[in-house]
Image (tube, helix red, strand yellow):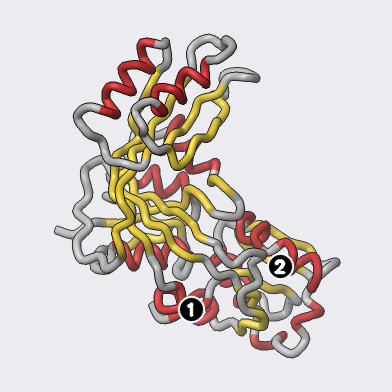
Amino acid sequence: MGYRVAFLGPKATFTDLAAAKLFPDEERIPLLTIPECLDAVQEDQADIALIPIENTLEGSVNITLDYLVHEVELPIQGEVVAPISQHLMVHPNHKEQWENIETIYSHSHAIAQCHKFLHKELKGSVSESVTSTAAAAQYVFAHPELRIAAIANELAAKEYGLEIVRHNIHDFAHNHTRFIAVSKEAIRFRGHSEKENGSKTTLMVTLPADHPGALHQVLSAFSWRKLNLSKIESRPMKTGLGNYFFIIDINMEMDEVLIPSTISELETLGCTVKILGSYPSFLISNQSKTFSET
């Protein structure tokens, strides 16, 4: 029996493209928000949720982190890192006059990734955030009477019948997004064709009562064991100003000695530690074939 994979939709989002690569033969269920994807797994309406968690240019997707920590109990079972290309697209009716568009729709992260282009080429136009890049493309196609545009990928232009008027409008070339696969059970990544990119273990660490040197002591527990951290980020506990927890990514899978002993040391220091997942990482390496020909 195959998996039911909930992803941030509608069709032709970057998450859809990543899901097609990581789960090419599984049923994919588009949902409109990240919380809906996670709730679908929590409530057994889907087996896996594939959602964005971090972008090279815009950093962490906070709703993903906060919902995983505060709302659901779903371990991370895998991740895929995918290259991102943003394009400006309009309804075919406005192809020749695209410089006169009044409003640009896209996901807030996509708009931020294209700030320089928008400021230089479309100064005076209004940017409006929607739930996804594909939702923006869908909206533009449904409103041919409006002078509007979308920022999305090539598949979205094909899916929703739009004309790309400017390619690769993102501010920096090395634009990638990390997507995580969460599930109640371990996932068999059958049939994937992407390059494996090592393994990670993600911890949530809450410091004891604030005192000088607390964070230094936490980092030292990893340092002297020579555990390489690819990311450390603070997020509010939502219990009062100044109360934070830390998300820490370790560049190795859970072992029997180093990570468990690190956790024991942190707990001895008075920290609370929660394992959010230990999982393989996959890399989509060829952007043009992945996102133009899928």
The number of discs equals: 2
Identify the residue shown where x is 81% and y is 79%: 100
In the image, residue 121 above or below residue 187: below
Callout 2: 10 Å neighbours few (<14), some, many (20+)? many
Identify the residue shown where x is 53% and y is 53%: 55
Dividing the picture into quarters, in which one does residue 121 lie? bottom right
Callout 1: 10 Å neighbours few (<14), some, many (20+)? few
User: Dividing the image into 4 quarters, which one contains the C terminus?
Assistant: bottom left
Q: Which mark is residue 159?
A: 1
Q: Position of residue 200 (x, y in %)?
A: 33, 43
Residue receiving disc 2: 104
Q: Which mark is residue 209?
A: none
Dividing the picture into quarters, in which one does residue 75 lie? top left
Q: Position of residue 120 (x, y in %)?
A: 81, 69
Label 1 secondary element: helix
Q: Determine if residue 256 is in view.
A: yes
Label 2 secondary element: strand
- For badge 2, the amino acid type reads Ile
- For badge 1, the amino acid type reads Glu
Q: Position of residue 18 (x, y in %)?
A: 39, 63
In the image, residue 80 above or below residue 148: above
Asked if the residue under mark 1 is in contact with the one under mark 2, i.e. CB atoms within 8 Å, the reply is: no
In this rendering, position of residue 273 left or right of residue 154 = left
Identify the residue shown where x is 41% and y is 67%: 17
Identify the residue shown where x is 39% and y is 43%: 39
